[in-house]
Amino acid sequence: MSGLAGMTLVWRGTTLDRMWVLNPTAYRKLAPLGETMAIASVGWFKRRFWGWGLAVGIISTQVAGGSINLVRGDFARGGMGLAIAGALLLYLLRPKVRTTFHSQSVGSTNDSNTSTAPSTHQKLLSNADNC
């Protein structure tokens, strides 16, 4: 979703622009973040740790926004936003998801190492997941 939103915000004038008719206020607020969301989606699909970190940051912002809406009394928008963003954040923070992104990043920067033995860092992550 982040990639789709980012692409429609960065590349204006496509047929996908019609989806912003549903929420023009969101378009005005999210337009400056289009590049960040597009970059996050690239990192996410390449399973880079920085892509995971950007996704966590973006979704955390959504959780904060939903919480603020609830406090302000906008229960429908705040409740729905908090529920959806909260579920996505819980998924992103699962140890298995985090480890997938971290191990991909470690493996991609260490291609010259031909050893098949796991590194100390990978062992620690594995032990943390088992707890």
Image (cartoon, grey):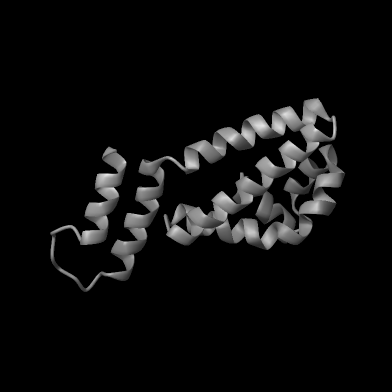
Instruction: Specify the quadrant that holds the N terminus.
Output: top right
Horizontal and vertical percent for residue 2? 62, 48
Residue at the image point whose x is 72% and y is 37% from the top = 67
Residue at the image point whose x is 49% and y is 53% from the top = 52
**Between 88 and 130, which is closer to the camera in this rendering?**
130
Residue at the image point whose x is 59% and y is 53% from the top = 57
Does residue 5 appear to the left or right of 18 in the view shown?
Answer: left
**Between 8 and 111, which is closer to the camera in this rendering?**
111
Which of the 4 image quarters holds residue 25?
top right
Residue 1 at least partly seen? yes
Question: Does residue 100 sit above or below 40 in this rendering?
Answer: above
Does residue 32 appear to the left or right of 73 in the view shown?
Answer: left
Which of the 4 image quarters holds residue 41?
bottom right
Q: How many marks?
A: 0
Does residue 128 appear to the left or right of 55 in the view shown?
Answer: left
The single residue placed furthest to the bottom in the displayed view is: 112
Residue 11 at least partly seen? no
**Between 50 and 23, which is closer to the camera in this rendering?**
50
Residue at the image point whose x is 20% and y is 61% from the top = 119
Horizontal and vertical percent for residue 4? 64, 48
